Image (cartoon, rainbow, N blue to C red):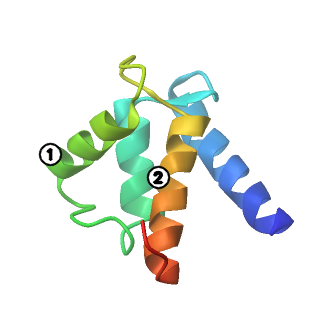
Amino acid sequence: MESAIGVLVSQFKAYAGSDGSSDTLSRDEFHRLVKSQLPNFVTNAGDSTAIDQLMSSLDKNNDGEVSFLEFWQLIGHLASIHGGFSL
């Protein structure tokens, strides 16, 4: 599990750091991450409108960016679905 967490953190920082801060994902960074890293786990990963709606649902503080904690909520949700756990 430790290596899986390490991969999630490093991938988040790699995508987040492309536009500046490695602490948050901008809209473009979030789109690139979802399309390249989660195409089989996120429904309509190729649809910009769907990704915008997903980002909006994650962006709890409405700052137009996704923090790591907000991103972690997505990962937990996707892992629960993938594992067959009830939500």
Disc 1 element: helix
Residue at 70 percent across and 48 percent down: it is 9
Q: CA distance from mark 2 to mark 1?
A: 17 Å
**x and y, in percent, of residue 46 in the image:** 23, 61
> From the image, which quarter does the C terminus lie in?
bottom left
Q: Relative to 56, does residue 50 appear above or below in the rendering?
A: below
Q: Which mark is residue 49?
A: 1
Amino acid carrying mark 2 in the image:
Leu
Residue at 78 percent across and 56 percent down: it is 6
Contact, CB < 8 Å: mark 2 with mark 1? Answer: no
Which residue carries the number 2 mark? 74
Q: Quadrant of residue 41?
A: bottom left
Residue at 33 percent across and 65 percent down: it is 42
Q: Which mark is residue 4?
A: none
The residue furthest top is 63
**x and y, in percent, of residue 77 in the image:** 46, 60
Disc 2 element: helix
Residue at 26 percent across and 67 percent down: it is 43
Name the one closer to the observer, 58 or 64: 58
